Image: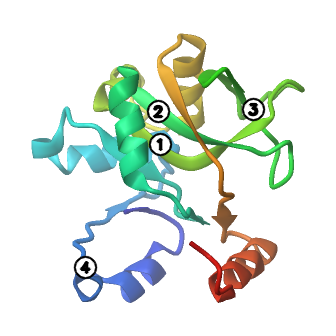
Amino acid sequence: MCIGYLGEMIQSVVGDGQRYGIRVVYSMDGPKLLGTGGAIRQALQRFPRAFGQAFFVLYGDSYLPIDFGLVQNAFEKSGKPALMTVLKNKNQWDKSNVLFKDHQLVEYNKLSPNEGMAHIDYGLSVLTPKVLDHYALQSSVTGGGSFDLADVFHKLSKSGQLAGHEVQERFYEIGSHTGLKEATDYFSREDKQ
């Protein structure tokens, strides 16, 4: 888990994950914030045996009712170095930021979405470490290390290197009071999948 501000609260509840039947290792953002991309790159450095293998990125403020196996299969079939799951949003839950046409991710643009964008980044992606190489090289030259995953996705989309996998069931963000209530209502329903 990549954690930052108040991350110790997550550590105190989740611990090493053993009581949940999983193994959890933490990568803590330092006093100089690394951004989402820098945090992932830092976490990868802790797992040299896994270097070169594709990995999932899941935003920590969302619950996604999704089959990870389907996403992995879509990634493997795409032949691209990265895949983003997308949901037809039409600005409903947040500003739509993905142009997805004919089962192809044409453009992702978090900073300057345009009117033709009806989909949104669902919060689950698959990446290969090589998509971060440019940023690792750049930060070693500049002495920085902070970069946003949104910039990586934007550049990948513009160069045709970002696959898209459309999902049908909405996400439940838990980073706001409204989102937390909607997630609680979802978990209270008897008909959820």
Labelled pair 2, 1 in contact (Cβ < 8 Å): yes
Residue drawn at x 64%, y 87% as measured from the top left: 190
Looking at the image, tell me whether mark 2 or mark 1 is earlier in sequence order. Answer: 2
| Mark 3, residue position | 111
Q: Nearer the viewer, residue 147 or 189?
A: 189
Q: Secondary structure at mark 1?
A: strand
Q: Cβ–Cβ below 8 Å for labels 1 and 4?
A: no
Front residue (pair 156, 188): 188
Res 136 seen here: no
Residue at 56% in and 72% down: 193
**Percent coordinates x, y for residue 74 in the rendering:** 41, 35
Q: Position of residue 177 (x, y in %)?
A: 78, 78
What's the residue type where badge 3 is placed? Leu
43 relative position to 83: left or right: left
Q: On screen, 55 above or below 109?
A: below
Residue denoted by label 2: 83
What amino acid does circle 1 point to?
Ser
Residue assigned mark 1: 125
Distance from disc 2 to disc 4, alpha carbons, whole Å, reads 29 Å
| Circle 4 Cα neighbour tier, 10 Å, few/some/many (<14 / 14–19 / ≥20) | some
Residue 91 placement, left or right of 32: right
What label sits on residue 7 in the rendered view?
none
Label 4, on which residue? 16
Q: Is residue 100 above or below residue 97?
A: above
Q: Earlier in the sequence, mark 1 or mark 3?
A: 3
